[in-house]
Amino acid sequence: MKVLTKVQSLILVSLMLLFSFAPVNAQEEEDDNYLNVGGAVRFNMLRTSYEGPSTSTSTNATLDTWRLNVGAKHSGVTLDFEYRFYPTFNTHFLKHGYLGYDFSEDLNMQLGVTQVPFGNLTYNSHSWWFLTPYYIGLEDDHNMGIKFDYDASDRLNIMAAYFRQAEPAGPAYGNASFGGPGAGTYSYNVIPDGDLNASIQEHHQFNLRLNYELFDGTFVGFSGQRQGILNTALDDTEYGNTWALHLDSDFDNFNLKLQYTSYDYKAKDDAGNTLDRVQMGAYGDPYYGDGVAASGDLITAGLAYTIGVDWGPISSVQPYIDYSYYSKDGSIELEGVSYDFEDSHMLVPGFLVSAGNIFTYVDWAFGKNHAWLTDDFGTGFGIGHTDDDGVPIPTEDLSWNMRFNINVGYYF
């Protein structure tokens, strides 16, 4: 009779244990499988007060968006998918859609269109409006690639990601000079623009985010991003570095978010010249003409306070105030005189009312040189507003533009 070696015996015992537990594990895995379908419908009621006189359309009501959400898990692989429709902008697009897998309790992978691990997550703001970083592609950004999320200890979280390109775009509309990858996306991306003679698009991006729980409820972090901007006419990619320091703190019923961001979208036009502005777009529409400064710095701060109530279906009210300051690099020369790009400001006081599945944001969004808060959409994030001679108007001389907005959303 052949005597088993120690190694063979160990293999045999391991196989016996594996097969003895296999049915149980399979049953547990089957019990973990799920398929959830949901979505949301949101409506906007608004009143604008911008540079020009009020008109009959200054007060308006719109169907903001409706969306479809699917979440599923099978054989340990998860699916998270969200598709949005924006009738007001005549566009629809994928917000995110990825396959996920947990290698362990501490390590997760997401493959597909997923949120970029940068800055305070999930959002760096409290209002429905977000803050200026969102409008230049640096808050709640989503791209196509692979991301790893690792809890290195009880207090330290590490995220690393590689994104080959921006997320797929839905329908876009605009002027004849607009072409290539569309602006019909949820996130703001660098896109081609004939006015700037730039056949550019996002291409190859690397992210690293470190977030540490300093003490209970208070997280401090560092985010680094190296993003490539490809000029397809030159077949050349320029790489810029972007980074942020961030803090997200819960204490009592307060939440405080602070962030400093420095970014650099290095890009060249079709003649090989370095651009001081790039074109960006989302929601089916690019920022015509003015574009976005290719580099700059942003400071954001937001404070919210949650009040629990028992007012019929209303369970809580959360007043907040969010602010962002945007300093841009770059200048324009007119008749031998150089003018710096003008700064931008955004201030959003408001409150959130939670009532079961209904969430209502009431916002007063104020802006100076803000591309959305103006009669001249798309102007403000590059040179800034100018006079009739094209000279940038000093930010301190601009009045605050304001949009009062009520967004009512039912989430199911």
Image (cartoon, grey):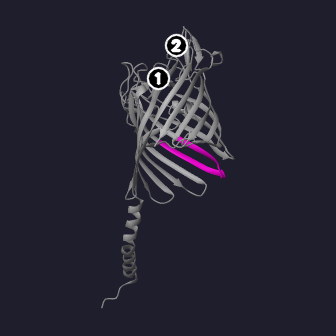
Q: Earlier in the sequence, mark 2 or mark 1?
A: 2
Location of residue 186 (image quadrant):
top left
| Nearer to us: label 2 or label 1 | 2
Name the kind of residue labelled 1 in the image.
Answer: Tyr
Q: Residue at x 52, y 54 (%)?
A: 150
Name the kind of residue labelled 2 in the image.
Answer: Thr
Q: Quadrant of the N terminus?
A: bottom left
Q: Secondary structure at mark 2?
A: loop
Look at the image and tell me whether residue 125 can be seen. no
Q: Are marks 2 and 1 in contact (CB under 8 Å)?
A: no
Label drawn at residue 287: 1
**Farthest left residue in view:** 1
Residue 312 sits above or below residue 388 on the image = below
Percent from the top left, x then y, of residue 74? 37, 56
Label drawn at residue 222: none
**Farthest front residue in view:** 312
Location of residue 340 (image quadrant):
top right
Q: From which residue to which does the magenta span run?
A: 206-224
Label drawn at residue 55: 2
| Mark 1 Cα-neighbour bin, 10 Å: few <14, some 14–19, many ≥20 | many
| Mark 2 Cα-neighbour bin, 10 Å: few <14, some 14–19, many ≥20 | few
Q: Identify which residue, 196 or 105, lies in the foreground.
A: 105
Q: Residue at x 52, y 39 (%)?
A: 358
